[in-house]
Image (tube, grey):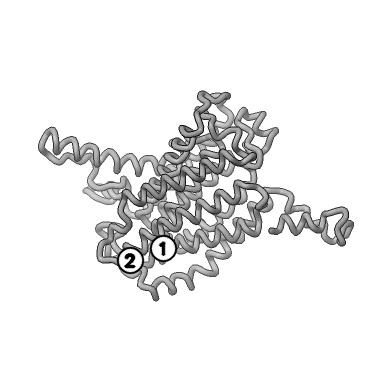
Amino acid sequence: MLYYLYSFFADPAGPLSGVDELSFLRLFRFVTFRAAGAAAMAFAIMMVCSPWFVRFLKMLNATGRGRDPGRENLDEGVPTMGGLLIIMAVVNSIFLWARWDNGLVSVFAVLLISLGVVGFVDDFLKVHKADISGLAGRWKLVAQVVIGCLAVYALDRLPEAGAHVQQLYMPFFKQPIWSMPLWVAVIFGAIVVTGSSNAVNLTDGKDGLAIGCTVICTAAYGVFAYVCGHRLFAEHLLVPHVAGASEVVVIVGAIMGAGLGFLWFNCFPASMYMGDTGSLALGGAVGLIAVLVKQELLLVVVGGVFVIEAMSVILQVICSQLSRRILKVDYRPFRCTPYHHHLDRGDHKWADTQIVIRFWIVALLCAAIGIATLKLR
């Protein structure tokens, strides 16, 4: 919106052309300025609206029951579905600061809202039904995969990204290792989006854990989006030049600003949780950025914390099932999963704040390693 305001005033044939007092509007040409503006606006929305939103959720009795086994006394009375406010802050910020003539902005906005709706249905059922399991897992997974497929297919149809969606890149390699058929690219991209969405959701089990790691991971992929969208930087660093990808930096800024604003109220002890509404949407957005900049495989490194959390659950289930069928015993390598629950149990358990801060440190290291790969090609 603000970019088009600049375009109107900067138009040589416009009614206000040549007015020096409006020269500051030229700042809106720069994606870095608009990304900073989107971050500041999203942060301000969260800071101003969160206290009211917490009261609103409490009035609706939307409490986060059953979120963290073993600390129900802390969870009791804390509202969930804070992701609604995150999505609202992000969408409003990118509406004001992004260029809507860039099709990527619309794709990401629709993805955020769609996955947010899936998460909202899940949270709503948990809050207002006796069964805290929420939306059936198979239906939630189907919805995520369908949304992921549609989002990746939309990227392929866009002139800003279509030339690269079907290319598969490996970290440290200068050229794509495989030109995938469209159907393979869509399925692969949907797996990345769905996997990232669920991994963030699994990580959301300690106050501030998931949102802090998400902000860090999103910032790292914001660097990739800026580099890929800049022709000279992309050529110098030997990464695919995705025309228009730099506009995604505005979306990254909005997510970071909203995430930091939410963290203000989600740090220990939390005033509200984002629930599946927020975690599914934010995780899916990170996955789609990875697909856009062709760094899907690098997500294993940049999102290292999310990978550890997801793999701990998968490994726990596999070991338990195999041991019961073959050895007739229930062997589980972890005391509880996801992995952050393993760490808060046992004789040498970590405090919640220790787990969160240490996971943030790991997330920062993973993000730094991922960004460093830009020079190792």
Residue 297 appears at what percent x and percent y? Answer: 46, 33
Quadrant occupied by the N terminus: bottom right
> Which residue sits at x=50%, y=60%?
86
Q: Residues within 10 Å of mark 1 (few under 14, many from 20)?
A: many
Please, what is the three-letter code of the amino acid marked with disc 2? Val
Q: Which residue in the structure is indicated by mark 1?
A: 81
Q: Is residue 377 above or below residue 249?
A: above
Q: Residue furthest left?
A: 328
- Circles 2 and 1 in contact, beta carbons < 8 Å: yes
Q: Number of callouts in the render?
A: 2
> Which residue sits at x=39%, y=76%?
59
Q: Is residue 343 above or below residue 41?
A: above
Q: Which residue in the structure is indicated by mark 2?
A: 127
> Which residue sits at x=18%, y=35%?
322
Q: Secondary structure at mark 1?
A: loop
Q: Residue furthest bottom?
A: 59
Q: Secondary structure at mark 2?
A: helix
Quadrant occupied by the C terminus: top right
Residue 257 appears at what percent x and percent y? Answer: 56, 56
